[in-house]
Amino acid sequence: MRLEEYWGVGPKTRATLVEELGNERAVQAIESGDVRALADAGLARGRATRILRRATGGDGIDVLATSDARSAYKELLDLAVEHAVTQRAADRIRVLTPLTDREAMESRLDDVLAARDAWAALGAEDQEAVLEAYERYDDREGSEHAAVETALALLAAGVDSGPFATIADLERDRLRAASDALAALDGDRGRVSEGADDELDRLRAALGTVEDLDANALELIEELRDGGVRDVVGFRDSFEDRLLTETEVTIDRVREAMPDDAADPTDFVGATLRTLRSDLTEAIDERETTVASDLEDTLEENRGAVDRAVGAVDDIALHLSLARFALAYDCTRPEFVTGRDAAVSVVNARNLTLATTDEDGVQPVTYALGEHDVTAVPAGVNAVPGDQRVSVLTGANSGGKTTLLETLCQVVLLAMMGLPVPAERAEVTPVDSLVFHRRHASFNAGVLESTLRSIVPPLSTGGRTLMLVDEFEAITEPGSAADLLHGLVTLAVDREALGVFVTHLADDLEPLPAAARVDGIFAEGLNPDLELLVDYQPRFDTVGRSTPEFIVSRLVANADSRSERAGFETLAEAVGNDIVQRTLADARWSEID
């Protein structure tokens, strides 16, 4: 395949990749999703990631029909990356996209959940050993030696199920032999590292000593003279003893190196040391060649085990990273609903963004659209959700309506990426277009037009669409907003889409199509700290109401001056002074209780 055929690779990018990697290696890097290779070649990491997302999952990226959907997708990847065990695994997570084939979704789920169960079954010490092995592997940029060491660490930990099964039948003796050979070769063929061979180490040490003596030959001669040497024979014998003592070179090699025709002590010592350096260098080269050849033979004998370990360790790193993410958020396997039925339903789902910041925990919610199988809801909810595919969600300010949209978006995206979801149970129909639109308080015609251009076309393509639209009325005047929103709800119903539309204009949307319902979220009062108490669990087929009386109650109680309090009390009269006073009384009694 030509490089220019990949999304995002123009003439300039192609030239950069070919210059640094060559055409074949560049194509291989793109096809394998190798962010590091492209980044090392000179591409910005973000650009490399975008190119690889398109190359490895272009159809899946097209599911993200709006900028807010793409933003939610990237936020999920960022959360998953925090649990990556290597940089390579983090890069591979960043290029994961929604999948368009249900079998592919199920297959990845199988791998991740099997990895989760296997990892959870390990003891803390074994987990730490595996993570340390992967840290060494990452530090050495995925070298063969580090991969083999990591495979041995995984085997030692007893991880042999799910994706880990790929290394379970590797012979440890072969891996250990290969590990020793790789360590000895030190990553460079023909260069044998220290400690690999005793004789080679002895020769190298001897050469080092001879080189030091040669560098200080004049001092050596003076030392020998100061030792009481009076004639040539005595000088020769003292020099010989010094060499044998400090270099461990054999006496035969020393005597062969000594010249018979030296003119003076300086010439004698210099010639001897030069000859020894030459002899030792030659001996080292010969020995290193022999040892390296033996090590290469060992590697060749165990090449199959090494290659399998390299491939398996990298894949296991990805699945282990995703497994740690699933464990961190107590994620479970979603059920896919396909065919004529369509559904998005969650039981006790949690918003991952909130879960990372809320120390008090996140109230789980149950919600459903379409032909779902939700038969039980939390206590206090007045009904089981109906089978309408479209809902209008209403309710209190700061009541969690936007959070619910985000939660549904997260569940659907994770499921379509073949990952577990943060819910006790979930049903998901894979969609062709995910339209997620957060509230944007920009009140002008340009924003309205651009919003309509982004959220309406996906409904017109004929594919399965999920609409998650938040406070559409924020971008135009209320009267027009109600008309347009009613049209969007009607269009979603007509196109058999799934959708949730958050609004404060529920009364203005009546009558809704029969296939749509209205749900509500309710505030229940103020706590002793005058913070709004909200039940984030929607009540089905019930219009939720805004709660200005609670907000006004808090303002009255927290007024900084008498005049300011009087102003807020005027607002209390407008919203219902008796309700405001009752709210304040309830908060005080709650504090006493």
Image (spheres, rainbow, N blue to C red):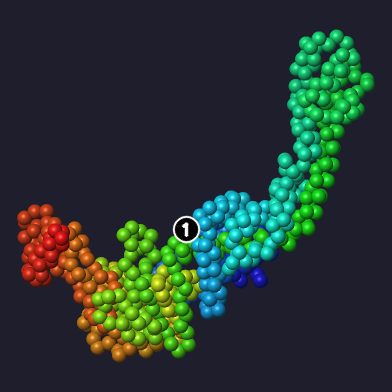
Neighbourhood count class around disc 1 (C-alpha, 10 Å): few under 14, some 14–19, many 20 upward: few
Q: Residue at x 66, y 60 (%)?
A: 310
| Front in this rendered view, residue 502 or 306 | 306
- Say whether residue 443 is visible: no
Residue 270 quadrant: top right
Q: Quadrant of the C terminus?
A: bottom left
Q: Residue at x 76, y 33 (%)?
A: 205
- Say whether residue 225 is visible: yes
How far across and how far down the image is residue 261, in percent? 93, 20
Q: Is residue 169 left or right of residue 120?
A: right
Q: Is residue 243 left or right of residue 325?
A: right
Residue 80, compared with residue 510, is above or below; it is above
How far across and how far down the image is residue 375, in percent? 35, 82
Q: Residue at x 75, y 22 (%)?
A: 216
Q: Quadrant of the N terminus?
A: bottom right
Residue 334, compared with residue 148, is above or below; it is below
Looking at this view, name the residue that lies furthest to the right: 260
Q: Residue at x 83, y 34 (%)?
A: 280
For badge 1, the amino acid type reads Glu
Numbered disc 1: secondary structure: loop
Identify residue for label 1. 82
How far across and how far down the image is residue 386, in percent? 32, 85
Residue 406 quadrant: bottom left
Q: Is residue 534 left or right of residue 182?
A: left
| Front in this rendered view, residue 457 or 143 | 143
| Front in this rendered view, residue 450 or 403 | 403
| Front in this rendered view, residue 441 or 450 | 441
Q: Is residue 327 left or right of residue 593?
A: right
Number of marks in picture = 1
Residue 209 quadrant: top right
How far across and how far down the image is residue 441, in percent? 29, 68
